[in-house]
């Protein structure tokens, strides 16, 4: 019998989540049956999309039920197997939630090559966030060499790879991030041509002025991760036939500012007169390009041509606080929880 | 020597245009030279896009200069020709502006088949507005049989054809229009399944409630002609992978309401979670499909399967007032000026 810890959703937030919305629960797992494997979590990935799962209304996926285990992806070690396809000691990426252990039938697991790179990268630059960056840039954004891209949340798990892939493609790459340290990192380590701290901008107009000076040829692709004043600043600077990859809007996830007088008409006018293509996407709709993303990106990671940064919190009991910090932008790069 | 009347822009509007922004000017045209033809305008087309040309800032096309002739398309008769490709008595569609006469070198004229349908249709259902409707529905909206489309400005020159083409495709078609008479016409003559009067809706929430009841399977395509509360009402009702064809936003053309607290976040959230594709388009970018539009639509017009309505104002001197009425939605269907 295995004692399993999990973090469960015990109430829904009304606005920004708090620690009271979560509870650490201990339960026991049955013995595995034929065809099953027992997983021990090494790292849990924390991602902004999880905020949406805490609400009662369906977004693009059903909500986590009250009392249920928080959703999420982990890298885990196989510590017992009655499935001929998996051996003890193998590492897999698996959507098992915020848990220390799980039983799986082996379906929808992705084996992680431990020789390629640290296994935590399977949740970051070589996992879902990386896949998201690659898809948003190439499939949705149709980014081309010589073009200019603006990336919000420029140093986040998604943005930091999007920026480096764009640079490797030969684009002008301008970031928006929260804080001087992140902006400095974007330029010195990730290769951004410019990066602006949205916290220093009084409003969208000021941020637009800074961006405008940094994009002498306008903006062809906007990789949207945040919403808020950054969106309002960027849209009027888009070039004709520009593309907006709408990947996230962390600024609005908790309801703050969603009723602000943000000028939809100005955005809509830009869409019409510039003939923009604005397209929302969720990476799980694009599994068909995962292999292409991986074969493009893994060699760059292996040869250290891609920089990635992780914020690692110790212990599953600290996952809720780490998640609140992520929503506040206090993390730097990919937010992980080291579970065992 | 021909005496030519024109309507010129003499000042730029600040907000809604007024009659004082226009002036009727009489001038004389030179004799035509070899290769040229002399055109006498029969009908002038008035279209919402002209409002944008009155502003100083470049939209997708340069502004009309102060003192210059208002831009626009006419159907005109050839009354003199020194060009072997054109004969007296032929009718052409030509972008010659708000004028009674013009000299042309014959380039970029479209000959109008006088046997096919009344020549005024070359400015409406078989001209630019028709081409716009067909392109917005098929190319941008990727409309499919069995899907549901919502069309704003449902009885306008563009919307009325979009609605009928959608119906002919086997779609559920719901309109939004301004006034009971237009809504009744949309249902009884154009075949809309439902049509709602946005003037009766207190706000976007009320309009959304009405629409919601009329689209039991959600909205797959939104043909956007207006902006304003209709946009705010529609976006949250879109289905996953829905398409928004952004064709116009007459509600905002004169600056009224462009700073309203319209909730961009709600729109943006719909774009992300529903993975919408929102795409602005200008019909002049899609000349490659004109022939396809025309060969699809002309037989339907010829066999009276397509209904179209025209508001015809007499005399070029009355074009400014007719244009102001168009911006106020006082016209019904295609707005034309009978010039000679």
Image (tube, coloured by chain):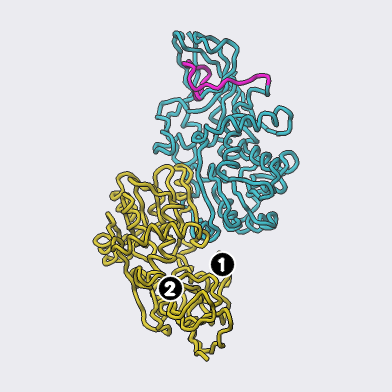
Chain colours: A cyan, B yellow
Residue at image location 46% in from the left, 72% down from the top: B93
Tell me the quarter of the image containing the C terminus of chain B.
bottom left
Q: Is residue A270 magenta?
A: no
Q: Mark 2 belongs to which subunit? A: B
Q: In the rendering, at what x and y percent does residue B45 appear?
A: 43, 73
Furthest-front residue in this view: B84
* The residue stretch that appears in magenta: A95-115
Q: Is label 1 in a helix, a strand or a loop?
A: loop
Q: Are marks 1 and 2 on the same chain?
A: yes
Above or below, comparing residue B97 to residue B211 in the picture: below
Q: Is residue A104 magenta?
A: yes
Residue at image location 53% in from the left, 61% down from the top: A273
According to the picture, the residue beneath numbered tag 1 turns out to be: B61
According to the picture, the residue beneath numbered tag 2 turns out to be: B46
Dominant SS in magenta: loop
Which of marks 2 and 1 precedes in the sequence? 2
Above or below, comparing residue A217 to residue A135 in the picture: below
Foreground residue among A122 and A143: A143
Foreground residue among A199 and A184: A184
């Amino acid at each position: 019998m295995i004692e399993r810890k999990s973090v469960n959703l015990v109430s829904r937030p009304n606005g920004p989540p708090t620690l009271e919305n979560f509870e650490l629960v201990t339960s026991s797992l049955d013995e595995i049956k034929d065809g099953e494997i027992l997983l021990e979590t090494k790292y849990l990935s924390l991602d902004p999309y999880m905020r949406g799962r805490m609400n009662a209304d369906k977004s693009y996926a059903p909500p986590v039920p009250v009392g249920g285990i928080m959703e999420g992806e982990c890298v885990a070690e196989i510590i017992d197997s009655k499935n001929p396809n998996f051996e003890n000691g193998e590492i897999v990426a698996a959507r098992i939630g915020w848990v220390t252990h799980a039983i799986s039938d082996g379906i929808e697991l992705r084996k992680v090559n431990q020789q390629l790179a640290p296994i935590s990268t399977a949740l970051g630059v070589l996992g879902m966030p990386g896949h998201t960056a690659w898809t948003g840039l190439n499939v949705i954004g149709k980014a081309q060499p010589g073009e200019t891209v603006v990336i919000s949340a420029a140093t986040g798990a998604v943005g930091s790879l999007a920026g480096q892939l764009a640079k490797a493609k030969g684009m002008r790459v301008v970031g928006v991030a929260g804080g001087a340290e992140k902006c400095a990192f974007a330029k010195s380590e990730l290769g951004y041509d410019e990066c602006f701290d949205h916290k220093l901008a009084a409003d969208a107009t000021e941020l637009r002025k800074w961006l405008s000076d940094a994009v002498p040829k306008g903006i062809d692709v906007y990789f949207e991760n945040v919403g808020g004043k950054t969106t309002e600043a960027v849209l009027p600077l888009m070039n004709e036939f520009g593309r907006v990859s709408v990947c996230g809007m962390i600024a609005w996830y908790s309801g703050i500012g969603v009723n602000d007088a943000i000028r939809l008409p100005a955005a809509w006018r830009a869409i019409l007169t510039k003939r923009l293509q604005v397209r929302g996407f969720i990476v799980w709709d694009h599994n068909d390009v995962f292999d292409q993303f991986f074969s493009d990106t893994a060699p760059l990671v292996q040869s250290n041509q891609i920089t990635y940064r992780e914020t690692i919190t110790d212990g599953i009991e600290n996952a809720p606080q780490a998640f609140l910090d992520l929503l506040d932008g206090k993390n730097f790069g990919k937010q992980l929880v080291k579970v065992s």
